[in-house]
Image (cartoon, coloured by chain):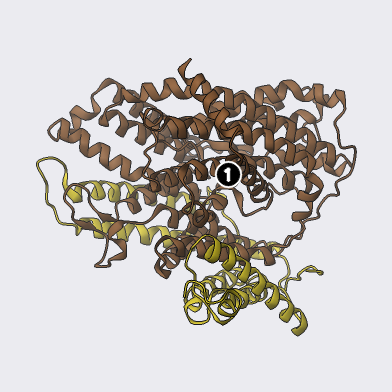
Chain colours: A brown, B yellow
Amino acid sequence: MNSWTELLGALGSITTSPILLLVILLGVLLGTVAGLLPGVGPSTAIALLLPVAITMPAELSLPLMVSLYLGAEYGGRISAILLNIPGDPGAIMTTLDGHPMALKGRAASALTISALASFVGSILAFLGLAFIAGPMSELGLAFGPAAYFAVVVMALVLSATLVGNAPMLGLTAVVIGVAISTVGIELQTGLPRFTFGTFTLLEGVEPIVAIIGVFGVGEILASTMMGHTGQGLSRLSGRFFPTKGELRQGTLPSLRGSVIGFVSGVLPGAGTTIAAFFSYGLEKRLAPASAGMGKGAVRGLVAPEAANNAAVSGSMVPLLTLGIPGSGTTAVLLAYLMMYGLNPGPGFFDANPVLGWTIIGALLISAILGVIINIAASPLLSKILAIPMPYMAPVILMLALISCYSIHNSATDVYIALGFGILGYVMRLVGMSPALLVIGLVLGEMLERNLQQALGLTGGDFGAVISQPIVMVFLAIAVLSLLTALPWKQMLGKQEDNDQRKDTECRSNRD
Amino acid sequence: MTSEPTLAETPHEAGSKTESTALSTGIAVAVLGAIAVFYLVNALLLPDTETDEGIGPRAFPVVVAIVLTCTTALGVLTLLRGRVEVQAVSKTELLRVAICIVLFALFAASIFLIGFAEAAAIFSVLTSTFVFGVRLSLKRAAWLLVVGLVIGLVLFLVFDVWLNVLLPVGWIEYLLFGGLNL
């Protein structure tokens, strides 16, 4: 029960600190706006907040970031319902029943129901996170470098196979990230690698610069193909509060979606998109034909919304207890934690109990503030969608420039980010997830360090490293996930009708 | 903004879709292939200095390079066989992306010459016009320039003055904010 005591203490500190409450409120507001704007999303928004974050202590900036992440999951549903374009990738499945509801003149009700479902998902997942974080962190302490190496390999392979268009392209994205992590001075020998005689690259590629590049700049380059927001914005029509019948229809799907979302969030790489996809799929199977799934069914709206919010807290489990990002956005958060010199993973809660539990407590406060803001301010928030991309894009690029420039007060980082932006754009063209590159980049250093330490302990015998039982378990999971993800039927010449999966996965490249 | 932007380009026709997909695939194959080859060559050129405590600076990058080459080769094969949903792109769209890249690079360079807010104002007008195809009359262009300048000044105020992120100062920032952080 020590964890609960710590958590209650953190919640007490948050509720009695006006500054912290204000920061969380700001995070939820910014997150909701970032989430509702197609082409921004939580990863980009968090990366663009760098200049603000570096002026704040970690005790304020990290609650700001997690509240922004949760706020974005609330906000994503607004454009999904009103515009039929998911504001963030986790809201993809919300379009299927949310937009038809709006077309039937029930937009206001759809926004309220989905906000309530998001709240249910956030609260249940918060409880799951609070319950599991302490024991998981203790468990992680038992891992040696070899086990950690295997955990990172497993996380990289799972990420590559769960997200994106094709497992081989996913793996390529992850390995490009790992390759970029090798740039700079090698820690054991102090020799420079891939620096090409330049001073700038001696410290390696700053993950935040890469993140701003692939998410911020890359997203804007991709949005040039959208031209302008020509889609029709649905009017905020219908009754504001849902009926008792609608609430009854949504209760069980919300609970199921929350559980699926939390579990999906815990899986490395799965994130909010897969969570929403799984929960919608389950509801579709359980629903009778009369439920009208895909035509504005309440259960089809609430299940993915509960799931994507629950996945946020779920993805915090591997991040805080093992130092492994559960999604692209948590990879950005991991980069932030490392920027502050904090090492999430085993022992994180022992070393930083106040910060660790404040981050978790901030999720609860964000969930409460999120539902209030998203119900009370939905007419105002929907108006933001009317701002066309041609006027929004230059502002996002200005913020990207400031974020990169602020790291070393140098334009070099801006040009490096531009390079990553071009790479991010090319990856998007073929459905490769830029988030995978970021996951590879932030985990690459951890992978090499643990491998070196494990080899050091075994006298350089790689066979001895991988023959440890726990290592074999993690590596077996990695191999199995890879084998099951490969398109065997296609490779053997059989055509597989897998349209739904393909359709969802190809859109999940920003999570 | 009171009026919606208009695009100079018409939507794609079905006939050009295949060609556009081939273009996307070609670009991705070229970029991914170049990265894999570049990394492999440079990893092999790293000095092989094994230490008592570890594997040295070369072994890990070489393994990564081999894995990268293999996954890239298989990924490229998947792309060339058309088994991946590729986003169609036209030459006009690529031109817009290229213009956006050039404008952003020029924006980064010009902040040191004319100041952040002034560069931001020019950048916003040029991006809206040449990247997103917004047709602007002289009056609307001037209005957009003013809006861009105001946004630039607000960002300067927030980041430079309040958050101490030192941004390059132009004449307008100097006059308005009294030469702060010069």
Check disc 1 and give the amino acid type.
Answer: Ser
> In the rendered view, would you say B114 is above or below A263?
below
Q: How far across and how far down the image is residue B13, in percent?
A: 71, 65
Q: Nearer the viewer, residue A31 or B115?
A: B115
Q: Is residue A87 above or below residue A389?
A: above
Q: Residue at x 57, y 52 (%)?
A: A45
- For residue A443, say whether it is visible: yes
| Quadrant in the picture for the C terminus of chain A | top right
Camera-nearest residue between A331 and B20? A331
Question: Quick one: label 1, few (<14), some, or many (20+) residues within 10 Å?
Answer: many
How many numbered marks have been drawn onto this rendered protein structure?
1
Left or right for B147, reference A459: right
Side (left or right) of A289 relative to A312: right
Q: Which residue is mark 1?
A: A508
Q: Position of residue A276 (x, y in %)?
A: 63, 34
Q: Residue at x 9, y 41 (%)?
A: B52
Q: Residue at x 30, y 28 (%)?
A: A147
Relative to A394, say whether A192 is above or below: above
Q: Residue at x 86, y 23 (%)?
A: A245
Tell me where residue A226 appears, x and y as whole percent: 67, 61
- Please name whichever residue, B160 or A286, is drawn nearer the observer in this view of the structure: B160
Q: Most extreme residue toward the top, as rendered? A: A1
| Quarter occupied by residue A127 | top right
To which quarter of the image does residue A219 belong? bottom right
